[in-house]
Amino acid sequence: MLPFSKALEAILNSVCVLSSEKVSITHSLNRILAEDIKSDIDMPPCDRAVMDGYACRRADLDKELSIVEVIPAGKKPEKEIGPKQCAKIMTGAPIPKGADCVIMVEHTKKPADKTVSIFGENTNNFIRYKGEDIKTGQVVLHKGTLVKPQHIAVLASAGYTEVPVTKRPKVGIIATGDELVEPHIKPENWQLRNSNSFQLAAQFETIGAAVTYYGIAKDSIDVIDKFFKKAADECDVITLSGGVSMGDFDFGPEIFKKNNIKLLFEKIALKPGKPLVFGVKKGFYCFGIPGNPVSAFVVTELLIKPFLYKLMGHEYSPVNLKLPLAETITRKDTERLGWFPVKITSDGRVKSIDYHGSAHINSLSDADGLISMDVSIAEISKGSLVHIRLV
């Protein structure tokens, strides 16, 4: 069995980043930037008022000042501020020439209609200076950034209505197994509804992949091979769910080899998720994923998710919290890196969830995340700080 860290390293080292395309800014959310984004202007583009108040010269703060104009946001100042003069100014408006500070309305009084006097402490200038945030030509977002809502504003302010992003990987999902039926069919006692494919599709789509579900292939080399060849013609990545263990009808690795896929590994030291197969062929990638739903979920979160992000040029870092255990957790099998679904309690502790193994699909529905136990570790004591990987 290949250690988990070596398996992840092998997967990520095999990646060739996909080519790029341009999409509308309105369709760039959750895409990966294919280029550095640079500003074509200074931000702010001129000195601007931070507060509503009066723009004047600091040298005149002890004098009664004449109001020479009113400057709302979006209006170019028309007059220069001279001695004993000021302009009434609104938040965001350009600072007029000659002024070097803005005095808040709250620190002024008006002896007459066209004059103003200043009182109180006036230590701040209340000016955002030209280029204070960003200079023309400065990189505002880096290549490889996962575009979030806060990045959309940056893209717009830098003038990018068309955004260079990496293409979405085309991922094909094939389920295998004579025992499987689609969700709309009520299964017989010896059958199972195909839940894996829909879980995987949701995980891949959340990452940003373009997913195609090819259906259920019966346990026949010829049938699975037919499904595989169709998907291979249309996709960058294929996930074969089931058929990768040690049973007589587990044909996944054989199908990969038959199609000249170079297998990098067939088993990893992970629980759940031991029978994971990964192979490559000139920018084409194949995963043989365990048929049990918890195993499929875990290997996708731990291995396929960072792989798909890297395929789009993004270095994925999962969100982890460090919290105390609410109870002692023990296990018997210590030969593999183990992962367990857990819940965060209202008092900020980590509590294990009723978990019967890799086929216990409902164990994940209430989980806030996963915690791990390293190889050879059989127990983590109550109160110990653990890293919870949010899902």
Image (cartoon, helix red, strand yellow):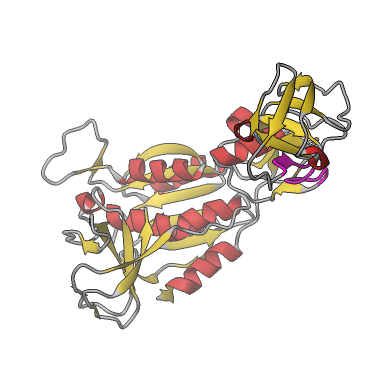
Is residue 143 a member of the stretch shown in magenta? no
Question: Residue shown at 43%/75% (left/top)?
Answer: 3
Q: Is residue 239 above or below residue 231?
A: below
Magenta run includes residue 126: yes
Most common secondary structure along the magenta stretch: loop
- Of the pair 266 and 144, the residue shown nearer to us: 144
- Comparing 144 with 225, the one in front is 144
Q: Position of residue 162 (x, y in %)?
A: 71, 31
Based on the displayed image, in which of its 4 quarters is residue 352 positioned?
bottom left
x, y (%) of residue 202?
A: 39, 41
Quarter occupied by the N terminus: bottom left
Q: Position of residue 64 (x, y in %)?
A: 76, 30
Residue depicted at 50% across the width and 42% down the height: 231
Residue 214 is left or right of residue 186, and the answer is right
Measured along the vertical axis of the image, is residue 306 above or below residue 25? Answer: below
The answer to which image quadrant residue 191 occupies is top left
Q: Residue furthest left?
A: 189
Residue 33 makes an appearance in the image: yes
User: Which residue appears at 30% of the width and 53% of the height?
Assistant: 368
Q: Which residue appears at 41% of the width and 46% of the height?
A: 203
Task: Read off the magenta span.
Answer: 125-137
Where in the figure is residue 345, as x and y percent of width and height? 23, 57
